[in-house]
Amino acid sequence: MRSKPTTSAPHFIRNIIEAALASGKHQSIITRFPPEPNGYLHIGHAKSICLNFGLAQDFNGTCNLRFDDTNPEKESEEYAQSIQDDVRWLGFQWQGEVRWASDYFEQLYNYACDLIQSGEAYVEDLTADEIREYRGTLTQPGKNSPYRDRSIAENMDLFQRMRAGEFADGARVLRAKIDMSSGNINLRDPVIYRIRRAHHIRTGDRWCIYPMYDYTHCISDALENITHSLCTLEFEDHRPLYDWVLEQLNVPCHPQQIEFSRLELRYTLTSKRKLLQLVTDQRVSGWDDPRMPTIIGMRRRGYTPQGIREFARRIGISKSENIVDLDVLEGCVREDLEARAPRIMAVVQPLKVRITNFDQAQATSRNADFHPQHPELGNRLVHFDNEIMIEADDFSETPPAGWQRLTVGGEVRLRYSYVMRCDAVIKNVQGTIIELHCSIDANTLGKNPVDRKVKGVIHWLSARHALPAEIRLYDRLFTVPEPDADKAHDFGEFINPHSLTVMQGWVEEAASEAAPESHYQFERLGYFCADRYDHQAKNKLVFNRTVTLKDSWTKEQVASPHIPQGDNEGAM
Ligand code: ATP
Ligand code: MG
């Protein structure tokens, strides 16, 4: 892990914690990351993970992983497992065992009985519609339910019978007795238990009543001695309820809830529900589709934990809107890969080149380092031969002004090899270019020609040595920055039709050894990652483009997947 602090430079939550430690209010901190196992985690969750685990690390505290598993119908073991994998992959480890809100179901039930005993909870017989009607609106106070003043004994009896399964789903609920005229609707006698005959991934069919999130969350925090309960801003209005519940009960401690703004990323979505819809509508191949902003999707695409953690550090923590450009995330990943991905050559749209003056006795292959600044990454032989392939769009018969790549009569440097001149263009009867005839200057291996300047450098492969590879190029999943902002249209309508392009390309022999998930820079094409599942699966090499070499998301790129990029000055 990097030595840099995981969380950002000072932010308001960090200040609160520093003050609490300085004043002696706390000796150390305990945070928690509390996902609901109802989907795969996305980049927004990564922000929360980096915050909670990062603060614990920075202040020598601990962080729990707790599943908020109070909605049995939507939760699954698969989701719970993936969340644990994601947290670990990001580089964090929770304290002790994974915790589950369902571990506290018995305690939560007993606390509910305590509320009834102290006259602060009652069993409600009104229907859901009636409850809504009685609740009032933002401008109108609610009114008391006719069942609000049931005796403690009657409430206890009914609540026990709710648990025992005597009533139908939805027939009754347990409500906290707070204030039906409160300006905060969350305090108008919120429901804290409902009857639901649903199979739970942990407790099976043991319970037919389930506690509500708001009631469960604060008590779970208190039972775990959490010092700071960090959540996103939509819970700000729920904080008075969080505090109310804890104040009524004899719990071990009263954690401090602090809210920060959610991360939203342009050109994608950060809502589990909407991401699930993309999966079920088969707009993507699954939660792990490399175009998805899920952690598992980003991982498959080749984003690194270090890059994502750096992103979380850079975007910071505050209460103001946190809508961020994808470029910021891509930039962090690119910076991380720049220093550690070995560099090799690949060709995605090959054009055949015959070397007409190739002389077996003279022509030499060269050794090249995998990384110019990191010789420790090793080196390999870059084979030269009488037939090579170059990128089709590195050649133009009628080049625009300032062209530094190949044209008839012009010269380029073949990366790590000779200077080559194009002498003839061979076309088929339709007039399509099928081959170039070129010659090399035998005197230019590893040195510049003395009498002239050759500026352009292009990548290439020896046709005999190159290996075929499937190359998957990715682009933004949506064509608009806020796909879910337009209420009149479903976000599925804004899917970028060019978000995936599959090419049959070629790579250097050196890539045959690549393990799934290993990272490469394909010179001038971008950073690539050997696909986690498909690479070497059916004797096939499969590479996903993680990110281009430069921030260059333009209209042309959507139309043409390969834009040769600079970064080659002086490379011999
Ligand atoms: P979603 O709306 O995507 O389903 P959620 O809040 O319902 O998200 P949870 O599993 O409850 O999902 O989230 C676990 C934790 O992650 C919560 O503390 C939540 O506040 C935080 N979190 C969720 N989305 C974001 C986001 N976009 N930015 C920052 N934190 C987030
Ligand atoms: Mg939630």
Image (cartoon, helix red, strand yellow):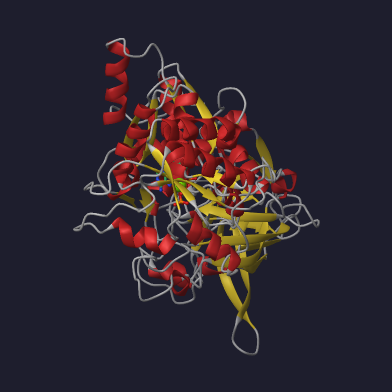
When the figure is inspected, residue 361 is found, relative to residue 228, above or below; the finding is below
Q: Residue at x 34, y 50 (%)?
A: 324
Where residue 313 sits: x, y (%)? Answer: 38, 35
Q: Residue at x 25, y 59 (%)?
A: 137
Q: Is residue 195 left or right of residue 59?
A: right
**Closest to the observer, 447 or 314:** 314
Where residue 65 sits: x, y (%)? Answer: 54, 32
**Closest to the observer, 481 or 565:** 481
Displayed quadrant of residue 87: top right
Q: What is the number of callouts on the image?
A: 0
Q: Farthest right residue? A: 539
**Closest to the observer, 142 or 49:** 142
**Closest to the observer, 329 or 75:** 75
Q: Residue at x 49, y 72 (%)?
A: 396
Q: Is residue 429 left or right of residue 566?
A: right
Q: Residue at x 58, y 32 (%)?
A: 106
| Residue 194 visible in rendering | yes
Q: Farthest left residue? A: 139
Displayed quadrant of residue 466: bottom right
Where residue 502 sits: x, y (%)? Answer: 62, 66
Where residue 173 sits: x, y (%)? Answer: 48, 50
| Residue 4 visible in rendering | no
